[in-house]
């Protein structure tokens, strides 16, 4: 593998940059508490396992060569995020104090699906990981899997930190009832905004 320090630096910058995954971790931390945020982080990183495997196997090339398939998957992901946002606004699902019972299995499942239904993640891995593969060393697929594992490790740490601090901020906001009661609305609108961004992106 080539230039691991540069790979790590690039991966960290890409993970920190605002995107659907880290924004959802942020919102869940503020609205649902620390446990939900950390479970969401684990869910998004679990989805990266599949994207890494597909990139290593070259299957993601199918998405790149099929605009129709890419579009269908993109709209499915956008629709799923819009559904989460609608449910949050309708039921106040994300307007739960940290002490309330949060269905962590549901949070994990939603996070995994949200990641898997974003075709840009798979294409990103297909474009990004090979840049740091040493083809002369052979075992290209294995190198890509190792790079993917390294990417997932740093993503889990960064997502976890985002969720941890967001939960602390959410706890402070709940001390002010007028602000706290709007957390669920903010969460729902954020999911909807991310879904629309994914649907309308070129």
Image (tube, rainbow, N blue to C red):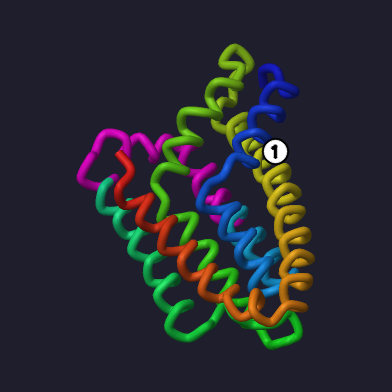
The residue tagged 1 is: 150
Query: Residue at the location (61% across, 81% down)?
Result: 181
Dominant secondary structure of the magenta stretch?
Answer: helix
In front of the other: 90 or 154? 90
Query: Residue at the location (61% across, 33% down)?
Result: 142
Q: Position of residue 160 (x, y in %)?
A: 74, 56
Q: Position of residue 127 (x, y in %)?
A: 46, 28
Q: Which residues are magenta?
A: 46-70
Query: Residue at the location (68% across, 36% down)?
Result: 12
Q: Is residue 202 left or right of residue 188?
A: left
The quadrant holding residue 105 is bottom right
- Residue 58 on the magenta segment: yes
Q: Is residue 47 left or right of residue 64?
A: right
Total of numbered circles in the picture? 1
Q: In what quadrant of the picture does the N terminus appear?
A: top right
Q: In what quadrant of the picture does the C terminus appear?
A: top left
The quadrant holding residue 31 is bottom right
As drawn, 176 above or below 11: below
Residue farthest toward the left in the current orientation of the protein: 68
């Amino acid at each position: 593998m080539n230039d691991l320090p540069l790979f790590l630096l690039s991966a960290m910058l890409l993970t920190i940059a605002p995107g659907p995954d880290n924004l959802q971790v942020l919102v869940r931390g503020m609205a649902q508490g620390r446990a939900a945020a950390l479970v969401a982080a684990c869910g998004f990183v679990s989805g990266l396992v599949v994207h890494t495997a597909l990139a290593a196997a070259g299957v993601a090339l199918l998405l790149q060569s099929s605009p129709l398939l890419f579009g269908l998957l993109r709209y499915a992901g956008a629709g799923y995020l819009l559904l989460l946002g609608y449910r949050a606004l309708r039921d106040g699902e994300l307007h739960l104090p940290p002490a309330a019972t949060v269905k962590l299995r549901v949070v994990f499942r939603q996070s995994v699906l949200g990641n898997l239904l974003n075709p840009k993640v798979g294409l990103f891995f297909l474009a990004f990981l090979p840049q740091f593969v040493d083809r002369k060393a052979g075992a290209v697929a294995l190198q890509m899997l190792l790079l993917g594992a390294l990417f997932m490790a740093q993503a889990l740490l960064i997502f976890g930190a985002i969720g941890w601090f967001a939960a602390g901020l959410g706890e402070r906001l709940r001390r002010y009832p007028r602000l706290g009661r709007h957390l669920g609305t903010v969460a729902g609108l954020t999911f909807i905004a991310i879904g629309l961004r994914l649907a309308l992106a070129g």
